[in-house]
Amino acid sequence: MRCKICGKESPEISESLKVCLSCIRKKPELAIPIALEAHRKSREIFGLPPFPPKEKDGRRCKICVNECKTKDIGYCGLDKHSSNEAKLSWYHDPLPTNCVADWVCAGGKGAGYPKYAYRNGPEYGYKNLAVFFHACSFNCLYCQNWHYRKETLLPEKRTLEDVLSDIDEKVSCICYFGGDPTPQLPFAIKLSRIALERKKGRILRICWETNGSMNRRLLKEMMRLSVQSGGTIKFDLKAWNENLHIALTGVTNKRTLSNFQYAASMLKERREPPPLVASTLLVPGYIDVEEVRNIARFIANIDPEIPYSLLAFYPHFFMKDLGFISKHFAEECYFEAKKAGLRNVKIGNLHLLV
C-alpha cells in the first residue's frame, strides 16, 4: 500500500488507514482526517455514530472519555447505561484460562495464595465466568473481537439475575471484557457487588480487561472490587503517541494514561497477586519500538514491578491486510521494555510470531 501523504510504499501501511506511521507522527494535521475517514466507514457498516455525538440539546453522558451529548445513541451504540440490564453474553471456561494476565494472576498461576489454598487447576473443576460486553468506547481498526458490533444495536438485553444464575460454587473468577466493560460499568459493578455478597466464604475474584477510558469515579470502584477480591484490572495501552492512538482507535489516549496512573496509586493496598497489568498489541507498521519504549518508560516511572505484556498481532477487521510480526521484532520490543526499567515483561501470543 502507498501512503496517501508521502507516497511511501510498504506492506505495513494499512489499506484502510491509507497513511504511514511517520506521517501520523510528523504530519498529523494531514494524516488524522484521513484516518478518521477510515473510522467513519468502519462504523457506518454497523449503524454506529461516526464520531462522538455533540448535539446542542442532547443528554450529556459522563461514563467515558467521549462524553457524548445526544438524544439518541452515543458513540458506544447505547442509548442508556443501566445498572440492571445490559447488552452482553457470557460463558464458562476452565482455569487456568486464556487471559492477558494469566502469567501473573491468581487464576492462572495461583499468585498470592499459599499452595494449599490454590485450587484452580482443571482437575478441581474450577472455572472462569467470561462476561463479554457488546459495546465499546473505542473503535480499533484491528479489533480482535469486532463481531460484537453486530449485537450492539439489537434490542435484546440481559438482566443481573440472568448472569448471576450462572455463578455457581465452581466459579472462582469473573472477567469482564468485550467490546469493553466501560460503557456498561454501572451494570458490571452492581453485578460484582451482588456476586461477592453471595459468595459465602469461597474465593471469587473480579477482573477486567479494558481500554481504560472510563470516568474516574467508576475506575475507583473497579479497582476497589479487584483489590479486595484478589482480582486484576488489565489496561490495554494501545499507543503512546496521541495522534497514533486516534488514528488506530478513533479516540484520544489522555484519559487512559491518566487513569492508569490513578489505578497504580492503589497498588499500595495489595501487591500480590498484581492488581494492575498493562498490555500492548504490536500492530505491524504502527506500534514500533519507539512506542513500546515510551509506554514502558511511562509504566516504569510509576512502578517498575507492574507486569507488561507485549501481544503478537493477528490480522483482523479493517487491518486484516497487515501481516504477522516477527519473533525478532517482538524480542526487540521485549528488551526495550526491560531496558526502560520494567522487571516483569512477557511476549504473548507466541504462536502468532513468524
Image (tube, rainbow, N blue to C red):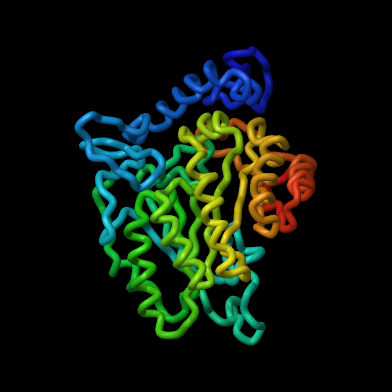
Q: Quadrant of the N terminus?
A: top right
**352 sits to left or right of 62:** right
Q: Quadrant of the C terminus?
A: top right
Residue drawn at the location 69% of the way across and 45% of the way down = 297
**51 sits to left or right of 238:** left
Is residue 283 positioned above or below 218 on the image? above
Residue 290 place in picture, x, y as percent: 71, 35
Residue 264 place in picture, x, y as percent: 57, 57
Residue drawn at the location 58% of the way across and 63% of the way down = 267
Residue nearest the observer in this picture, 241 or 12: 241
**233 sits to left or right of 341:** left
Residue nearest the observer in this picture, 211 or 85: 211
Residue nearest the observer in this picture, 263 or 161: 263
Is residue 348 positioned above or below 252 on the image? below
Residue 341 place in picture, x, y as percent: 75, 51
Residue nearest the observer in this picture, 267 or 187: 267
Determine which quarter of the picture holds residue 5: top right
One can see residue 289 in this view: yes
One can see residue 327 in this view: no
**250 sits to left or right of 99:** left
Q: Total marks drawn?
A: 0
Residue drawn at the location 45% of the way across and 37% of the way down = 139
Is residue 69 positioned above or below 145 on the image? above
Residue 108 place in picture, x, y as percent: 61, 69
Residue drawn at the location 58% of the way across and 61% of the way down = 98
Determine which quarter of the picture holds residue 112: bottom right
